[in-house]
Each structure stands twice: as structure tokens, then as C-alpha cells.
Image: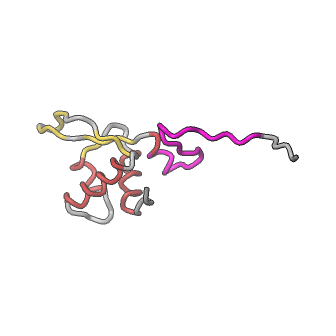
């Protein structure tokens, strides 16, 4: 997996900062780089693919059906990297505390 861009970090921070799940139309005016709607969707899609943001089912908001997004635990570790990120299906390696020398 490649790293994440500064635009993705900004979007991730805004999604994390909202108390409730946020939809694209709420996110767009808060972004500093003034993207088109398609560019913002591309940024969010990349975060969903990387597992940092979760895409929620359609919900009626402000009179229309909208997709909302919320932060995942993996996404919070990007903003606050005090813990290790481990893939769900990846076995955990444990190094022995003492290795005998023969």
C-alpha cells in the first residue's frame, strides 16, 4: 500500500473531527484546497480502499439519500500513531525475549 497524500490527511482529519458521520456535501466546503466534487470523491474513495474510512449505507439527510463516511480504527492511527497497525488477517509475529547462543 502506498502512503497517503496531504489532501487525504486533511479529509481524514475533517472526518475524524465530526461527531456524526459526514457526507460529501458537508465535507466539500471545509476542505482548504477547493476540489471539484469528483476530485473529493476520488480522495475519499482512496481512503475507503486503504481501510481508513468506512462508507456507510444510504441514509436520508437534508431531504436526499446520501452516503456518509466515518473513521475506522486504522484511520485514527494515521492521525494518532501511538499504536501499531496490524492487518486483520495478518499473523502476529512474536520475537522471543531470550535467544540461546550455541
Q: From the viewer's perspective, is residue 84 above or below residue 38?
A: above
Q: Position of residue 2 (x, y in %)?
A: 43, 59
In the rendered structure, the answer to whether residue 60 lies left or right of residue 44 reads left
- At 63% from the left and 41% from the top, the residue drawn is 93
The span shown in magenta is 75-96
Of the pair 74 and 64, the residue shown nearer to us: 74
Q: Quadrant of residue 33?
A: bottom left
Q: From the viewer's perspective, is residue 11 above or below residue 54?
A: below
Q: Main secondary structure of the magenta part?
A: loop
- Colour option used: secondary structure
In the picture as drawn, the residue positioned furthest to the left comes out as 63
- At 30% from the left and 52% from the top, the residue drawn is 44
- At 31% from the left and 39% from the top, the residue drawn is 21
As for residue 83 lying within the magenta part, the answer is yes
In which quadrant is the N terminus drawn?
A: bottom left
Q: Position of residue 76 (x, y in %)?
A: 47, 45
In the rendered structure, the answer to whether residue 23 lies left or right of residue 73 reads left
As for residue 50 lying within the magenta part, the answer is no
Q: Position of residue 48 (x, y in %)?
A: 33, 47
In the picture as drawn, the residue positioned furthest to the bottom comes out as 33
In the rendered structure, the answer to whether residue 93 lies left or right of residue 86 reads right
Of the pair 99 and 97, the residue shown nearer to us: 99
Q: From the viewer's perspective, is residue 24 above or below residue 20?
A: below
Q: Quadrant of residue 19?
A: top left
Of the pair 38 and 34, the residue shown nearer to us: 38
Amino acid at each position: 500500500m502506498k502512503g497517503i497524500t496531504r489532501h487525504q490527511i486533511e479529509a481524514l482529519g475533517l472526518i475524524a473531527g465530526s461527531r456524526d458521520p459526514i457526507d460529501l456535501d458537508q465535507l466539500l466546503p471545509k476542505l482548504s484546497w477547493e476540489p471539484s466534487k469528483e476530485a473529493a470523491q476520488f480522495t475519499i474513495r482512496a481512503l475507503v480502499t486503504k481501510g481508513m474510512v468506512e462508507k456507510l449505507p444510504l441514509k436520508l439527510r437534508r431531504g436526499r439519500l446520501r452516503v456518509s463516511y466515518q473513521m475506522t480504527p486504522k484511520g485514527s492511527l494515521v492521525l494518532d500513531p501511538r499504536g501499531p497497525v496490524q492487518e486483520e488477517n495478518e499473523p502476529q509475529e512474536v520475537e522471543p525475549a531470550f535467544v540461546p547462543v550455541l
